[in-house]
Image (spheres, coloured by chain):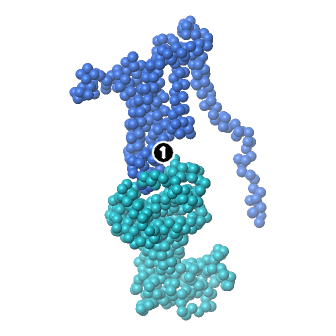
Chain colours: A cyan, B blue
Amino acid sequence: MTTADAAAQAHESSTVGPDPSRNLRLESLTKAFGRFTAVRNLDLVVPRGSFFALLGPSGCGKTTTLRMVAGLEEPTEGRIYLGDDDVTDLRAYKRPVNTVFQNYALFPHLTIFDNIAFGLRRRGRKNVDDAVDKMIELVELGSQAGKKPGQLSGGQQQRVALARALINEPEVLLLDEPLGALDLKLRRQMQIELKRIQLDVGLTFVHVTHDQEEAMTMADTIAVMNSGVIEQMGPPSELYENPATTFVANFLGQSSLIRGEVVGSGTSELLVDVHGSKIGVDQKRAHVHEGPVWVGVRPEKIYISAAGEEDNAEGNTVGGGTITDTSFIGVSTQYLVRMPWGEELNIFEQNTGARPVLAPGTSVDLHWARPHTFVLDAEQDATAGVETVDDAP
Amino acid sequence: MSAVTEVGTEPEPAEAEEPIGRRRYTGYLLILPGLVWLALFFLVPFYSLVATSLYDPAGTVFSGYEMTWEWSNFNTAITENWQPLLRSFLFGGLATLFCLLMGYPLAYAIAFKAGRWKNLMLVLVIAPFFTSFLIRTISWQLILADNGFVVETLQTLHILGADGRLLNTPFAVVTGLTYNFLPFMVLPLYASLEKIDPRLIEAASDLYASPIRGFAKVTVPLSMPGVVAGTLLTFIPAAGDFINAELLGRPSDSMIGNVIQSYFGGGNNYPDAAALSLVLMVLIVGMVLFYVRRAGTEELL
């Protein structure tokens, strides 16, 4: 208890905001369950005050990582630091870390008020009324304080779970798929709400999710996890525009990956031969620089035109495709184009109304700007991360 | 277009056409066997018991009984037997307490710590029921016998005096009651502990509750329905029991069950026996209602 109190006091007296001395740091963290290694040699720094997302398919080790930070799971190897304090061997109830559980885990026998006051009371705070009322206000549950969790809707329960964790002003707030049980509309609403609250209170949020859109909406930094390791980490836009592995390219949004061979390498550009067409790539976006590669481009970056109709001297062009399917989906039209080498590529085009929709069977050329191209290691599986996006956790 | 029209005019699902009348009576039909059973084996005997308690005590089985509205039967029953009555509640209460103290850790261990041994342990809790209640109680005579291992060991250790004994003492009666009713405590406790979501216990520890405080603030309150059910299932039959007092106790330590049994059996004193049975029943129902109110688990009844 004493350590938690000391840490809590230290926290209360410190000013909220970016303070590198209170970063969450994981050092070569490993967790094995028998023969299965859930988390492998993980190194990670979560800056104080950031909204950090651990994104990955179910079973990738993200929840295990979170549970180790919470103290609910003991690491097989490695250390966990909060600032300079090594908390690896600290029991869960002594850590200045709180969790919003996946199914909320609200105490069914306590009222909303008592649920939210639980943490403060366990730490020996005598007068909790003001703090609890303020927190109930923050999550907009004013009239519900006397009810039991079973009487609330899913969205309200979610907010109680959030309030119950936030009121303790933890150094790090852990969110384990907090919106997983909500319907789509409510989820969108809560995403914005969560982001607002995070900015309000300025605490470090570590958010575990399998929903890439949710991660991109809320997080400052995303770490994409797969099979116990972090594949890539960075701001959402960077991850999206410049994925480092096929898994990230497919798991975060969609990608068209085409087989190519590096034929030339300049200082700023790489030249790749793609089934006869020469494609230029920024060196910054090339994750391999020789031999067989995957040339990748996001489907919405591709400009589709009837064969030979448009010239794209500055950019990359691949010709010889035939539209096999045209789906109109309101804001955009989705084309499926069969390339001469047999691969089918996805192309999204915004429905601006400026151009007519192309019918299936049309011969087309595909164009895109050089900066939108990325190059990945051909050793990697081109389908890694595909279709797991919508898997339930 | 025609397809759409067809879908629209498709006949209503078959269930809706079934006569509503038949359905209305289904519920009553289903509870009919239960009602008949209750009427035959509860209402009729209960009426007969109440009637018997008001018969003229001067009657005998041979000469017959007369209905004389003898309310004084209750007075006699209580004034003559308040000691066994009190003793019953004391012994029953002690046995319930010991069952709770032993049964809670056992149920907790089975629910949370037994792992793959869970089913085996549950079977072991129930296994004694495969032997007759009488045989098991008589076995305690052997265990607690004056020249038995337990008494001799305690005498060697000077915990028990040289002529001290265990059999035919209140201790033996409470021991027997505790032993015999322990499964009635363990099973409901297990059922309610097993239902507790382990994530709630994790949440408590995440919210700064040490294991002991988490247990007190989360596990115990959530297991209250099991505690209430277990104590009721133990206390009610234990307070009315007469086998344990008969086989393990002295006549001077007799419980109310023994008195009722002797009135009905050898004494042929049906009116007093019936009056005493009703007194016991009213007292227990009163205590149970009070207890359940206090425990805040009305939904149990």
Q: Is residue B102 above or below residue A62?
A: above
Quarter where residue A89 is shown: bottom left
Decide if residue B20 is in sight here.
yes
Q: Nearer the viewer, residue A36 or A86?
A: A86
Q: Secondary structure at mark 1?
A: helix
Label 1: chain letter = B
Q: Residue at x 34, y 62 (%)?
A: A88
* Label total for image: 1
Quadrant where the image shows the N terminus of chain A = bottom left
Using residue B12 as the reference point, say whether residue A13 is left or right of it: left
Q: Which residue is mark 1?
A: B222
Q: Residue at x 47, y 19 (%)?
A: B82
Q: Residue at x 44, y 80 (%)?
A: A376
Quarter where residue B164 is shown: top left
Q: Position of residue A11 (x, y in %)?
A: 42, 64
Q: Amino acid at mark 1?
A: Leu
Q: Is residue B24 above or below residue A10?
A: above
Decide if residue A248 is in sight here.
no
Q: Extreme left residue here?
A: B156
Q: Is residue B38 above or below residue A360?
A: above
